[in-house]
Image: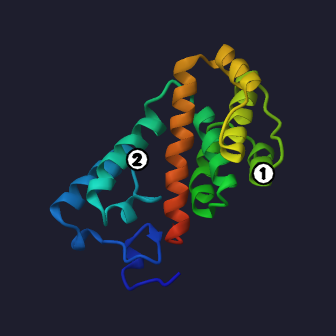
Amino acid sequence: MTPHSTDRELPMRSRLHLPTLLEMSLEQAAIHAKVLATRGNAHGPFLAWLLAPKLAEPAQELGAVCRFGTSLSLQESELLILHVAAHYDCPAEQEIHEPVASRAGLSDEIIIAIRTDEVPPLATARLRILAEFARQLVTKKKVPDDLYKRALHLLGETALVEAVGVIGYYALVAYTLNAFEMRKA
């Protein structure tokens, strides 16, 4: 990772030249403002995505829905995100989302189990089925019929679609963070 002179101004380091506020076009600045308004910071892939504003705009909108606009609880969403981060060995995604997961009520024991590819000791059937569903989807690229039926029964179709959306979106995030060696500054 090659830091550049503006790293002190940016929340993320990268092998890309990430735009500072002074370097952003009006289109980039508008998207950046939306990211800050919904998330409070630009941690994660957003500054990289700003280099391609046509990608950045819908990606940040999808991210806002996946993070804040589903029927899943914050704890459930963070559980899914941590499974994606662990599967893709994405340290930036882990360093961003592990503290959020902890504040949402996932214990250190659960967070470490996910990070080390162990089965986490989850208290509820809903959390257990989401963890199993996420793990199957990221490792096997599909979900077997028996797991699908159990998840459908426990979660319903809407939550299943949302869970897949969260998993898919955070895979894009992990690919971006890993490809450009992005880390919190």
Q: Residue 23: give x, y in percent of width and height.
A: 23, 73
Q: Secondary structure at mark 1?
A: helix
Residue at the limit of the structure toward the top, as seen here: 153
**Residue at position x 58%, y 36% in the image:** 77
- Read off the residue under disc 1: 112
Instruction: Return the mark for residue 39.
Output: 2
Q: Quadrant of residue 89?
A: bottom right
Estimate the x, y position of residue 151 in percent, counting from the top left.
68, 22
Q: Is residue 10 visible?
A: yes
Q: Amino acid at mark 1?
A: Ile
Residue type for callout 2: Arg
Above or below, comparing residue 65 to residue 158 in the picture: below
Left/right of residue 134 with respect to residue 18 in the rendered view: right
Label 2 SS: helix
Seen at 52% across and 63% down, the residue is: 177
Q: Residue at x 67, y 38 (%)?
A: 134
Q: Earlier in the sequence, mark 2 or mark 1?
A: 2
